[in-house]
Amino acid sequence: MESRIEGTKKAEINMRFSEFEMPPMQDVLIVGKRAPIGPEAARRMVDILSPEQYEIIKIEHEYVEAIVVRKSLLNMLPKHKLVSIIMEEGGKIANESMIIRAQINITLNVSKSIDL
Amino acid sequence: MMKKILNIIDKNFMKVDILNGVRRVQNVFYEKNMECFAAYENERLVGVITKKELIGVHPNRIIADVMSDKYVCVDCCTHIWSIKEMFDLNKNIDVIFVQDENEIIGFVTRTTLNIELGKHIDLLTGLYKSDYIFYNTYNLIRSGQNTTVVFIDLNNFGYIDKKYGHINGDIILKNVAEVLKENINQDSYLCRYAGDEFAILTPYCTEDSRILAEKLINAINSFEFPNNISVSASIGIASYKLNNKKIGNVWDIINRLVNIASLASTKAKQNDNNSIIIEDVDIDAIA
């Protein structure tokens, strides 16, 4: 008696297209002390694609070595305030082997009154 | 006379580019036992990598992300005592690169230097040997300060050794070293020159050096040595000051200065009335 089970092999292909981000990192990278890519390598990587747009800020932290920040953010906020805000949240979730990408939106609300 | 850094450098180092991967350098470190890497960017030295930087770092990183800036470069003719001063002044520096005509030819670490300096420390008293005084004399002369050598010779030490034994003799030498150390200021340098002879280099004029010598003699006389052994010393003093003249051969001047002080201490030893002899001679005039 034959007991062979007939079967077929299929390959399922899914495609997903999206636009390549320029540069391939967003506003901030938080680089762990033992991360596979160091801050200088990250900066050089984006420097080739988007020259002189990012700056490395070395950090005194248990796990974080540095953060790489888009320079335009530093035009809107003083460096120490921006770093403090990023590290307040990012520092909680970072570990020393991670690289965390962060998107930061800053909206300045200005209201002025003038004498008529 | 004095050892230069060139004589003690370690040539087992490798030049790497800052964009090289850490994995490659780690492999060389483990396989070839190489412990120092000079990091270059476009032919320019920009960093150093030692065992400290390589251990625990992710091998995927580039050199630029692990290198340290804790290094300095010196010329190959720099004296080892200058290197000691550099390490003492810059506590965070681990490596000193040595260059010859702008080309790095080797490096020195604190450990290498300490091994070398250990050869210049007298094991019995813990004081430096004469090389230390020669270096500091060289510096004082070059800086145009008073340069005075106070040469201290213990009286009848051979007799003490024979009468009380070498163990007691050694204890006396250690005690005398302590007494001298306690009685000089930070601006002076002390060494055990040889056997029962010590030398102090001071930036004082002869009169101030005589006051120091009297203080030393009194301190030795009043110290209680083992078995109540009576110990005394004779001191010879010689001084030199650069008088707006062009410096000739500094080593020659140093040799004459030390020699005159040493002979003055011998004179003092032979003189029953005076245990301190100051030789007031023009060293420049001596051929």
Image (cartoon, grey):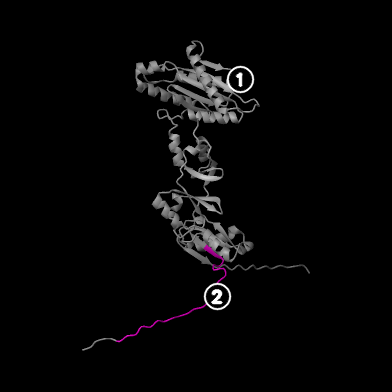
What is the magenta range? A6-29
Quadrant into which the C terminus of chain A falls: bottom right
Instruction: Inspect the image, locate mark 1, and give the three-letter code of the amino acid beneath it.
Output: Ala
Could one spot residue B186 in this view of the protein?
no
* Separation (CA) of disc 1 from disc 2: 87 Å
Task: Say few, some or many: other residues with alpha carbon within 10 Å of mark 2 (under 14 / 14 to 19 / 20 or more).
Answer: few
Give the main secondary structure of the magenta stretch.
Answer: loop
The quadrant in which residue B244 appears is top right
Is B120 within the magenta? Answer: no
Instruction: Inspect the image, locate mark 2, and give the three-letter code of the amino acid beneath it.
Output: Glu
Residue at position x 26%, y 86% in the image? A4
Residue B208 % position (x, y): 57, 22
Q: Nearer the viewer, mark 1 or mark 2?
A: 1
Residue A3 % position (x, y): 24, 87
Secondary structure under the numbered disc 2 in the rendered image: loop
The quadrant in which residue B284 appears is top right
Tell me the residue that label 2 is attached to: A19
Q: Is label 1 on the same chain as label 2?
A: no
- Please give the chain letter of the residue carrying mark 2: A
